[in-house]
Image (cartoon, rainbow, N blue to C red):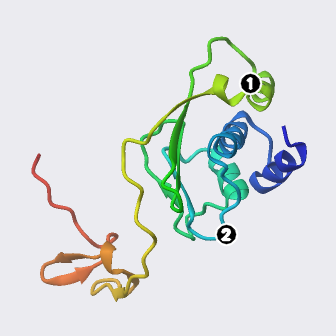
Amino acid sequence: MDRELWEKAVGFHGHQCPGLAIGFKACEAAREKMGVNFSPDEQIVCVTENDACGVDAIQLITGCTLGKGNLIYRGTGKMAFSFFNRSNGENLRMILRPSSREMDRQERQDYLLNAPVDEIFDFGSPTFELPERARLLNTVICEMCGEGAPEHRMRLSGGKRVCLDCFKDYSRGW
């Protein structure tokens, strides 16, 4: 385990915890199995299926961030991470295996940090396609509140262009 990198992840996240250790080991697995290193652009993409502590380690270690457009949140709630390499087409999905024994918080963190990645995760292929590169979109001003939002987040309501905060959804079942 790279102790110095772990300490950087802890500093970024704010504290040590088993959740951070999961993301730290996911990065280790991506490095071992795909050669993933820090991505200064959108070459490496991570799709995270959760919004938990481990995502902070993913951002720090891989350079995949929401702002850069190469960290994508897919809210299934699963402790799963899919990595894509745009340059060679490689991809890998990993999901945390359920624990087979009871551990307290510190034991769980120590186990996660020291166990081999093949013991911690199940590996396979993502069941979805590589997301497209981030696009620059026009800002549209909401005709109700006057605030700007990207065009793909606007809706029509009563003939007016409105933001999602002002839009009143209409659904009758299906």
Q: In the rendered structure, find residue 127 and report the number of the disc placed on it.
A: none
As displayed, is residue 53 above or below residue 61?
A: above
As displayed, is residue 102 above or below residue 151?
A: above
Amino acid type at image mark 2: Pro
Q: Residues within 10 Å of mark 2 (few under 14, many from 20)?
A: few
The residue most toward the front is 88
Where is residue 30, by image quadrant? top right
Residue found at x 90% / y 48%: 4
Residue 23 spot, x, y in % from top left:
66, 42
Residue found at x 40% / y 65%: 132
Left or right of residue 163, residue 62 in this image? right
Amino acid type at image mark 1: Arg
Residue 163 spot, x, y in % from top left:
32, 76
Where is residue 28, by image quadrant? top right
Left or right of residue 131, residue 63 in this image? right
Residue found at x 51% / y 50%: 90
Residue 130 spot, x, y in % from top left:
42, 56
Name the element at disc 2.
loop
Q: How many angstroms separate mark 1 from mark 2 (CA)?
A: 32 Å
Residue at label 1? Answer: 108
Q: Residues within 10 Å of mark 1 (few under 14, many from 20)?
A: some
Residue at label 2? Answer: 40
Q: Nearer the viewer, mark 1 or mark 2?
A: 2
The residue most toward the right is 4
Split into 4 quadrants, where in the image is the N terminus?
Answer: top right
The residue most toward the top is 101
Q: Is residue 21 visible?
A: yes
Name the element at disc 1.
helix
Residue found at x 84% / y 53%: 8
User: Along the polypeptide, which appears first: circle 1 or circle 2?
Assistant: 2
